[in-house]
Amino acid sequence: MTDAVSLSNFLPIVQNGADSVLNGPRTEADMPSAMTPSNPMTVYVNGDLSLNSFTGYGLLVVRGNLTYSGDSGWKGIVIVLGGTITATNAPGGNGEFDGAVYLANLPTGGGVTLVNRRTMWRTTQDKEFITTPAGCQLH
């Protein structure tokens, strides 16, 4: 996917094949209990998602805002469309995102940015959509 429009056109296919489709706002309590490192899943959230002390595996699509505590993470691909990604809590959490993160501002036609775990917070072009508390180090 090279732009937000093609990604947006692809998402109905992902939603139809998802293991879990949730209408937000949702939390980690709503994530599929069968999701494990050996059983990754596709989770599609229509709305906001907040994760606290949770690690997910597979494909996560959020059509809204993704908020997570410093000790949450995802192993796989995260796509956030039309919203923001916000880290909460003080620095020092053990969570991390391994894989790829797409962040696109669909309402204003912003671009899609593919970033990896090591550089995702330094290379994104949509920096205004990522907020962190003072002193929080994301990697």
Image (tube, helix red, strand yellow):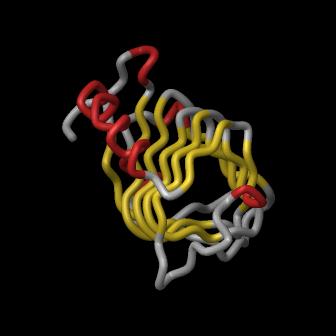
Q: Position of residue 87 (x, y in %)?
A: 67, 51
Residue at 71 percent of width and 71 percent of height: 93
Q: Residue furthest bottom?
A: 38
38 is higher (above) or lower (below) than 17: below
**Quadrant for the N terminus in the image:** top left
Residue at 57 percent of width and 68 percent of height: 56
Q: Residue furthest left?
A: 2
Q: Residue furthest top?
A: 108
63 is higher (above) or lower (below) than 114: above
Q: Position of residue 115 (x, y in %)?
A: 34, 54
Q: Quick check: 12 left or right of 135?
A: left
- Location of residue 51 by image quarter: bottom right
Tally of marks: 0
Q: Quick check: 20 left or right of 27?
A: left
Residue at 73 percent of width and 64 percent of height: 91
Q: Nearer the viewer, residue 127 or 45?
A: 45
Residue at 19 percent of width and 37 percent of height: 2
Q: Position of residue 117 (x, y in %)?
A: 42, 65
Q: Position of residue 47 (x, y in %)?
A: 63, 33
- Location of residue 23 by image quarter: top right
Q: Nearer the viewer, residue 56 or 113?
A: 56
Q: Quick check: 70 left or right of 20?
A: right
